[in-house]
Image: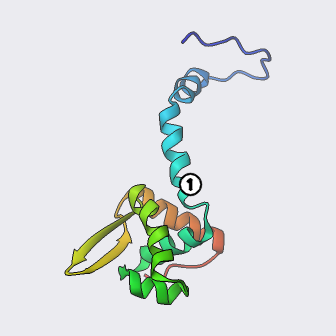
């Protein structure tokens, strides 16, 4: 795609080519948007934050959040599908925790900075 000439030249921008090249990568912005969409629900943000600190089963999550197990499962599914959570099965019990990725650690840090709390780790 041939870059369009900017209508206004406010200042010299040495990085304009880099910016334009990355703006065209819509799929990258879609991935980021999808992750933030998952955390756009306060219940999902609470679940994600909780699971950054421990691994829990749906029953315990339900008790901690004061919600039914089906409601918690409803929120866990998209968080898991987006890669923010991982799970393991032990018999009939499924345990969830935040994925051990740089992205999840960064999101955890952002949440705690926004809420002005310090991780107990």
Number of dots carrying numbers: 1
Residue neighbourhood size for the residue with mark 1, other residues' Cα within 10 Å, grouped as few (<14), some (14–19), many (≥20) = few
Q: Dividing the picture into quarters, in which one does residue 16 lie?
A: top right
Q: Dividing the picture into quarters, in which one does residue 11 lie?
A: top right
Q: Nearer the viewer, residue 95 or 18?
A: 95
The residue drawn where x is 35% and y is 74% is 96
- Residue 84: tell me if it is visible: yes
Q: Position of residue 110 (x, y in %)?
A: 57, 64
Quarter of the image with the C terminus is bottom left
Q: Position of residue 54 (x, y in %)?
A: 39, 80
Quarter of the image with the N terminus is top right
Q: Position of residue 31 (x, y in %)?
A: 48, 44
- 11 displayed left or right of 3: right
Q: Which residue is mark 1?
A: 36
Q: What colouring style does the render use?
A: rainbow
Q: Nearer the viewer, residue 98 or 71?
A: 71
The residue drawn where x is 64% and y is 73% is 115
The residue drawn where x is 53% and y is 39% is 29
Q: Is residue 58 above or below residue 10?
A: below
Q: Residue furthest front?
A: 70
- Residue 120: tell me if it is visible: no
Q: Position of residue 41 (x, y in %)?
A: 61, 65
- For label 1, the SS is helix
């Amino acid at each position: 795609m041939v870059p369009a000439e900017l209508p206004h030249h406010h200042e010299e921008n040495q990085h304009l080519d880099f910016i334009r090249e990355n703006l065209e990568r819509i799929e990258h912005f879609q991935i980021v948007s999808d992750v933030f969409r998952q955390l756009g629900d306060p219940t999902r943000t609470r679940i994600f934050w909780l699971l950054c600190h421990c691994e829990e089963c749906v029953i315990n999550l339900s008790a901690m959040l004061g919600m039914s197990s089906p409601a918690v499962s409803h929120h866990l599914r998209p968080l898991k599908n987006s890669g923010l959570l991982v799970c393991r099965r032990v018999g009939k019990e499924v345990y969830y925790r935040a994925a051990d990725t740089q992205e999840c650690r960064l999101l955890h840090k952002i949440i705690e900075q926004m809420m002005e709390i310090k991780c107990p780790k």
